[in-house]
Amino acid sequence: NNQIQFNPWLSDEWMETAEYCRESKIAITGYNSLGGFLEHKKTHTIEVLTTLAEKYQKTVAQIMLRWALQKGTTVIPGTGNPKYMRENLSIYGFKLSKEDVQAIDELRTAEEMKKFTILESKLWEK
């Protein structure tokens, strides 16, 4: 099991790590799936996410968690709030279409993602 940050605006290196893990049958546990402590409120400003939340009648957080699940990642959202616990658990009751997963995938390279802090990795540089 490899625990890595996993959200729609990951750096190329982290996405390569996730792909390597999937290809090698290594389970991924994603943390910061909602953008992390400093970034999660900005997710409500992303039109693709808010549009999908309306389409599925879910919250932006539920859309992001469901996306991560459909990408083959186990998510570990943390909350002490019973309301959010119920919301987090309800992500198993719906599925995003392939087109909607793709729309979220494409956010990584969208101009509006520059507002997020992306932890750039230098693992592959020598």
Image: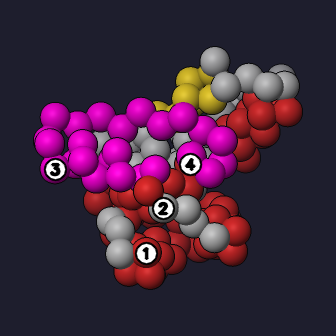
Percent of width and height locating residue 125: 80, 29
Which quadrant holds residue 27? top right
Disc on res. 83: 3
Tell whether label 2 touches label 1 (CB within 8 Å): yes
In the image, taking residue 115 as reference, residue 80 lies left or right, namely left
Determine the CA span between mark 1 and mark 3: 18 Å
Residue shown at 14% from the left, 41% from the top = 81
Determine the CA span between mark 3 and mark 4: 21 Å
Nearer to us of marks 4 and 2 is 2
Query: Is residue 61 at all visible to an observer of this figure?
Result: yes
Determine the CA span between mark 4 and mark 1: 16 Å
Tell whether label 3 touches label 1 (CB within 8 Å): no
Labels 1 and 3: the sequence-earlier one: 1
Percent of width and height locating residue 100: 62, 72
Disc on res. 74: none
Residue shown at 55% from the left, 41% from the top = 6
Crowd class of label 2 (few under 14; some 14 to 19; many from 20; radius 10 Å): few
Disc on res. 68: 4
Please state, as top left, top right, bottom left or bottom right, where the C terminus lies in the image: top right
Tell whether label 2 touches label 4 (CB within 8 Å): no
Labels 3 and 4: the sequence-earlier one: 4
Crowd class of label 4 (few under 14; some 14 to 19; many from 20; radius 10 Å): many
